[in-house]
């Protein structure tokens, strides 16, 4: 069964040219990079609290699966290649293979699945947008905590305490921001179309 794309980007720019899509991807990479610089170290954890997950929730849902995935992939490749786009203006392959790697890969996966859900209009109403954002965060933290557990060789309780517990309040706030702002933007877009 196929669904027509109904992401915010597809609705606002239905006839996007290659130049428009490239500009959106570049802008998304800059947006993700900027949010990654909002980084707060967590005592006892190799993983900082960042604004990056908010960027993933917003990019994945507003861009849709294809362009969202392309945006995050370019962001990840830029960081691996040496651009200072990761938290604390860091870069390099060791960020993907190190303690934070599971979160970075989780964000890649979440971007795609959030885009698929957005293509099915799940970001247009509060009642579906909030669970969509929770789902995206669960993907990110499931991958992140699992990788942290295996990478450090520490037990699951330590991995959860270092890789999930300190992030819960911030993540609830990010979910609330993304899960309420997108339906509001959709209301404006739909009102203008009428």
Image: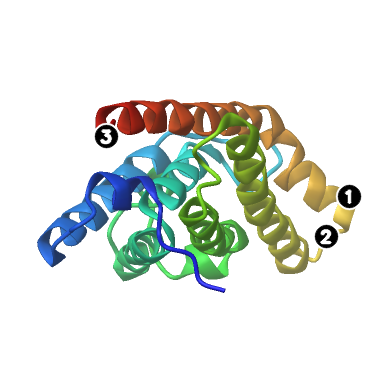
Distance between the alpha carbons at the discs numbered 2 and 3: 54 Å
Do callouts 1 and 2 mark residues in contact (Cβ within 8 Å)?
no
Task: Give the residue at x 71% y 40%.
Answer: 44
Asked which secondary structure carries label 3, the reply is helix
> Which residue is found at the position 60% from the left and 42% from the top?
133
Q: Position of residue 105 (x, y in %)?
A: 55, 64
SS of the residue under disc 1: helix
Q: Are marks 2 and 3 in contact (CB under 8 Å)?
A: no
Cα distance in 3D space between marks 1 and 2: 8 Å
Quarter holding the C terminus?
top left
In terms of image quadrants, where is residue 130? top right
Residue underneath mark 2: 154
Residue denoted by label 1: 157
Viewer-side residue, 184 vs 83: 184
Q: Can you tell which of label 1 and label 2 is closer to the viewer?
A: 1
Return the residue nearer the eye: 154 or 115: 115
Q: Quadrant for the N terminus, please.
A: bottom right
Whole-angstrom CA distance, mark 1 to mark 3, is 51 Å
Left or right: 156, with 24 as reference point: right
Residue ID for mark 3: 193
Residue at position x 57%, y 41% in the image:
48
- Image side of residue 12 versus residue 137, left or right: left
Q: Which of the two marks, 1 or 3, is nearer to us in this view?
A: 3
Q: How is the image coloured?
A: rainbow
Question: Residue 83 lies in what quarter of the image?
Answer: bottom left
Decide: few, some or many residues near mark 3? Use Cα within 10 Å; few <14, some 14-19, many ≥20. Answer: few
Q: Nearer the viewer, residue 142 or 70?
A: 70
Question: Between tags 2 and 3, which lies in front?
Answer: 3
């Amino acid at each position: 069964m196929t669904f027509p794309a109904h992401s915010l980007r597809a609705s606002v720019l239905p006839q996007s040219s290659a130049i428009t899509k490239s500009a959106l991807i570049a802008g998304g990479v800059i947006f993700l990079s900027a949010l990654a610089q909002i980084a707060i170290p967590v005592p006892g954890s190799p993983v900082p609290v960042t604004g990056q997950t908010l960027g993933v929730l917003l990019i994945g849902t507003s861009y849709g699966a294809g362009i969202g995935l392309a945006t995050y992939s370019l962001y990840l490749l830029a960081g691996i290649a040496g651009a200072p786009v990761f938290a604390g203006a860091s870069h390099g392959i060791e960020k993907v293979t190190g303690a934070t790697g599971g979160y970075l890969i989780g964000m890649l996966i979440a971007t795609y699945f959030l885009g698929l859900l957005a293509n099915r209009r799940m970001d247009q109403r509060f009642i579906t947008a909030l669970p969509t954002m929770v789902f995206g965060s669960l993907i990110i933290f499931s991958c992140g905590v699992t990788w942290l557990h295996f990478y450090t060789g520490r037990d699951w309780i330590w991995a959860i305490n270092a890789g999930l517990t300190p992030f819960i309040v911030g993540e609830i706030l990010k979910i609330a921001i993304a899960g309420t702002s997108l339906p509001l933007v959709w209301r404006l877009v739909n009102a203008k179309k009428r």
